[in-house]
Amino acid sequence: MATCFWMLKQPRFIKCFDAEPSANNIMFLFNSCVESICEPSFARNGCYNVINIIQAVGCANVGRLPILANFLSGSLCPPYVP
């Protein structure tokens, strides 16, 4: 969860990713991230799927968020285990 928890703590990222007051979109992203980290058969590709979602909605360039840059680089994704 630590790998994904930043998504719920960064107001600028939340505002970019989820303009709805329900927070459904950010919770979907957080849940997808946790699943991708915790599920061994899904981990590496799942993590990159979350990265692709963030890029697709245009939130890859939210400023002054080093954790976002680290996440998008793939350095927080689990290693590939065949």
Image (cartoon, rainbow, N blue to C red):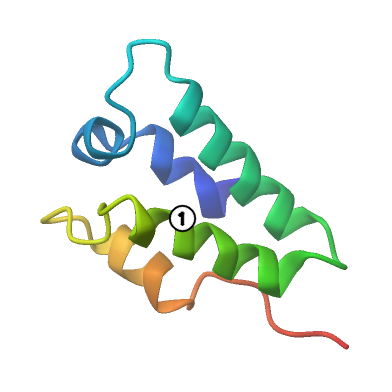
Residue 46 placement (x, y as % from top left): 67, 63
Dot 1 falls on a residue whose secondary structure is: helix
- The residue drawn where x is 29% and y is 68% is 69
**Residue type of the residue flagged with mark 1:** Ile
Q: Is residue 32 above or below residue 68?
A: above
Q: Which residue is mark 1?
A: 53
In depth, the one of 19 and 12 nearer the eye is: 19
Mark 1 Cα-neighbour bin, 10 Å: few <14, some 14–19, many ≥20: some
Residue at x-position 50% and y-position 21%: 24
Q: Position of residue 80 (x, y in %)?
A: 74, 85
- Looking at this view, name the residue that lies furthest to the left: 63
Tally the marks: 1
Could you tell me residue 18's position as x and y percent? 33, 29
Q: Nearer the viewer, residue 54 or 39?
A: 54
Quadrant where the C terminus is found in the figure: bottom right
Left or right of 75: which side holds 19? left
Residue 41, above or below 14: below
Identify which residue is drawn at 53% across, 57% down: 50
Position of 65 compared to 40: left or right? left
In the depicted view, which residue is nearer to us: 43 or 65? Answer: 43
Residue 80, compared with residue 11, is above or below; it is below
Q: Quadrant of residue 26?
A: top left
Give the residue displayed 21% in from the left and 55% down from the top.
65
9 and 12: which one is in front? 12
Snapshot quadrant of residue 20: top left
Looking at the rendered image, the quarter that the N terminus falls into is top right
At which x and y percent is residue 55?
35, 61
Which residue is situated farthest in the top direction here?
A: 21
